Image (tube, helix red, strand yellow):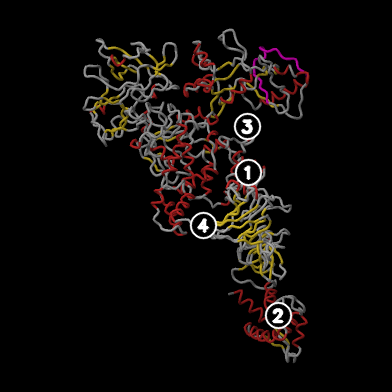
Amino acid sequence: CCQNCRRKQRALRDFQYDEEDGEGDIYDSFDEFMEDFEEEKERYLQQCPIAFKSIDADADADADADDDDETSPVQRYREHNDATGDKYTLQFSWLERHLQEEDEECCEGETKCEEGCVPQGASCSKSNQKVCTDGSVVGANSCCPGEEKCLDGSCSECCLPRVIVEGICSNPIVCTDGSVVDANSCCPGEEKCLNGSCSECCPPQVIVEGICQMPTEVKSLSCEEGWRTQIPTGGPIVLERSPALCILAKAIPDPDGTVPLTKIAPVALSYDNNDWEIAAGTFARTLLKNTTLTVYNTGSYIDLPELPEDQFYYITGYTHEVSEVNKVARLLETATFGTTAGDLAAWTKGDVTTETVKEWIVEQMNLPMTSHREFFRTRSNGRNLNPMPIGRSDHPCDGNTRWRKFAFISEEGSTGRWTNPIFEATRTGDGSYILIKTNGYLRTVLLPKNLEFPDGSSLKFKFNKEYNMCYRHDAEAGGAIWLEMENGLCEELTMTNPYVQFFHNSPQPEYVLNLPNMSEGVLEFIDDEYPGRGGVVILHPTLNDPLCEELPEVTMEFAAPIFGRMPDGSYLQFDPRLILEENTLESPIPDGGGMVEKAVGETWGRCSNVPRTFLNEEQCTLSKSLSTCGSSGLPDSDITLESDQITDIHDITGRYVYAILGLPTIDAFNTKQPWPCQGGLVSRWEILDAQKCTETQLGQMSKDSLTQLLVERGEIDKNAYLRDIRFPSVGMSCNTEDQEKLITAQIIIGSQCFKRVHPDHMNVYDFNYWANVGHPGNSIAAELNHSHPIKRWMDDDNSVFMKYPAFKGPDDYETLTDHPISRWVNQSPNFAKLGRYGDTVRIIDLPNEIREHFGAETTFFGEDVLVCGSPFESANDPKLGKVFEASTGRDTDFTIWKQKEDTWITIALNAPDQLRQRIAWALSQQLVVVADAISVSRWSSEAFLTFYDIFTRHAFGNYREILREISFNPLMAENLTYLQSKSSAYMLENENTISFADENFAREIMQLFSTGLGKVELDGTPVLDDQGTPVLTYTNEEIISFARIWTGFDYQQGRGNVEETSSSGNRHDPMKIQASWRDKFPKTDMTGGYIGDGYPLCVDLPDQM
């Protein structure tokens, strides 16, 4: 209001004019002036419209008013202000001039500045701020809202040379009619051609009588049912759309003019009035490799390649009709894994139309998801003789328990066990019965006649003698059983797997429960792995036998077996099965699995509480149970790799960890370590007492350079036994005549002697690979009855050092030979390195197989613990049978690696949510994890199915969520090698190693999973630079920067209730980030900025309470 009033006051004060008689006159009000002005303006426009219409009004236009009786307001205004020829529209330019007067008074709520009045709170523009037209205040060098910074530093709504075209700021093209369009648009009368250019008529069309059409010299062909015509030669042709099936083919006729079917090849086709398309197959693609089908209103234009004289093209029209049932089949073929007769019969939507297809798609999207992980877990009902990290066994008095008719199962004789069961056969005192025992417990009773063989074969075993059970027994009545005989070989017995039986006057087993008779729904056969010979049954109801209270809560493998007796006097043996608990997002285990962990004990128990991540944080709940377990993660502590601590590692983990000795700098085959003075080479020196050394005589340059490096490194490297130095590429050198001497050199510095050793000398490794199956000397030593060549150092000598037999010693067994250093080089990648002997390392930097045991020690119990679940971590259902076998680390099924494939095939064939499954499969082909790249692929199923479920869960969802989940998935991290990738700074500070973050995933997530290699327009065409070269989406600079993003990713703490061994790593839950491994420095993005630029800084946030 004040500002409006102020403008009127200026008009009353300043605008006056002189009459011809010289008497002064002033308008009484602004409205009076405007009324007079508008009246004069209307009359003036009729005489001289250009004066008001043009911004460049010419002052001479006032002369047009000379014929009037009185001076016009325009002339009077200009005479008063002496502004002849000014460029302004009269009303507003005049008012603006007065807004800038220095002596004016500002209204309430305004501030007076040198440049005029501005809103209070805003700074004057001459104080490096300016006030925008909308009242906002920005810096003097910044642009107001709606403006952009131009190259010359100015601000504009549209920087030159761009102009606003239809409300969009664009690069302009001036058309011949004077109109301006965007550079990517066509001018009036033009159309966008297929090559991106604009033309009034896109080639090969031409304008004929004002109409754009094909030239008359281009032949146009139509096609109808039963019609055929020959095209004797190639060249341009227009093929009209065909309502029938029409095929363009190439033919090679026989000499008699006939064309056999074997000499006809389809080139292109059209049907149902669709555009022509190139025929499938390599022939058509090869023939037309430099030719395209160009679609126009009249048809499809193609320039057919010329053919040899004895060949020609011809077009044939066929009767083409698709029944409604075939239309349904075609739809299902494209959107499912195949069409069945049942699918066709279930279609009740009528004709296949856009609406019925939409209805079917919506129905498919609303169907419950079939989870691959859930499908596998619910059907994983394998045997479990002993508690394992994955879970415990069921109790014989529970419902839905398994019982069997035969005595022995595969798991009792499998190789790779820690302790094999002991088999023994004895006779009763009167010789009436033969008692079969394992580990001293009665398993079954046989009559002597059962061991009489018609072929006269012997038993092989002796009575009253203990034998180790071995190999894999056939889990069926009459199947093979195996014993380790006196010669150490595992042999199949002539006695077959017997039935479980006891007689009224024979010795009885310790535990016998009362079972009901066989009947449907109560006690019935299941899991007929060996049809007609299996003998496995399921007992559905729970047992109320008083003996149930006396039985152990947890089934243990070497405890007394439990039997059941049916009313008819026949016996069954309890067949313990694995229990997987429900631990889903919606229903996590109430105590996180704490009660089970306590029940099975520290050795086998493992908390099942899922780490809190972005996947489950919305569903986690606070448990009030005192038995709730949780994990505080790996301890943030260090361990020094010396004798006592290495022994502790062995005692805690059971793994054979040694510091390696005996690696020579020159082996028996004259293989030598390189000269330590090579630029960039790291050499190792053992630190000894100077009195125990004889110093090598070196040239002065050699001694000075190496002494300086050893002393400087000693200020950083505090290892008391070893020192590693890196020889610089410039600035230092050694005497060339010292090359041979430096291979085994000894340098004395003060009281210390530095002896050149192999670069792996005294490294501490986990040698379990050699201790178990990877070392060929294991079997040789066993045959010769020698100590185990790997285990003996710890088990026999209580030593944490293992000597590599580079040179055969006098006490070594006779078959041992000198080992070349190349053997160590080839085998050492199989051993996880802990560090150097004497190093102090962090627990988190230990190999996963070892640190997991330290993590288990951080499990805690108590109330008010957050419990979380995992997607589709369902319970197994014993009623569904033993379809799959979850790996426990003591597996006997050699085909276990096929289970993930079997799961996928079964779901693809039978799942009702076919559309979801088909989309998930398509996504899995793009976002690939290669099984062979995953170390547990031979035995793990659940981890792969959990990964695949990412695609089933998000099949109708958001692609960004898919990228996030696969990026945090351990399988993808292992597959693309960024698992446990560490920053360059961390590696240099902690391992004296110059290295770079792994670049594999940084490259693949752009190239294969998101942006692709080249930039494209919205229509998919490549973006080209000024030289016509495709513009790349990213360069190596982005790869190097993004690689640093993917540092620090590590397994979550291992847990129970999932298919995981004690050392395999948690491959089921999204990874965590180890902060110390993480690259701390800024990472550039793909647009010239830095990742995180869009996030507010702490200084931008309001003060906290």
Tag 2–tag 1 contact (CB < 8 Å): no
- Measured in 3D between alpha carbons, the distance from the residue under mark 2 to the one under mark 4, in whole angstroms, is 74 Å
What are the residue bounds of the magenta stretch?
682-699
Q: Please tell me how crowded label 1 is: few (under 14), some (14-19), or many (20+) other residues with Cα within 10 Å.
A: few
Sequence-wise first label, 2 or 3? 2
Relative horizontal placement of residue 297, taking residue 913 as reference (left or right): right
x, y (%) of residue 132? 64, 65
Nearest to N terminus: mark 2 or mark 4: 2
Q: Secondary structure at mark 3?
A: helix
Q: Which residue is mark 3?
A: 989
Residue at the spot of label 4? 319
Q: Earlier in the sequence, mark 3 or mark 1?
A: 3
Please, is residue 232 above or below residue 666 in the view?
below
Q: Which residue is mark 1?
A: 1082
For the N terminus, the image quarter is: bottom right
- Between the C-alphas of marks 3 and 1, the distance is 19 Å
| Residue 694 part of the magenta-drawn span | yes
Q: Earlier in the sequence, mark 3 or mark 4?
A: 4
Eye-nearest disc, 2 or 3: 2
Q: Which residue is mark 2?
A: 52
Helix, strand, or loop for circle 4? loop
The residue closer to the viewer here, 247 or 922, is: 247
Q: Nearer the viewer, residue 1012 or 702?
A: 1012
> Callout 4 environment at 10 Å: few (<14), some (14 to 19), or many (20+)?
few
Tell me: 1051 left or right of 1011.
Answer: left
Look at the image and tell me whether residue 834 can be seen: no
**Position of 366 relative to 867 (above/below):** below
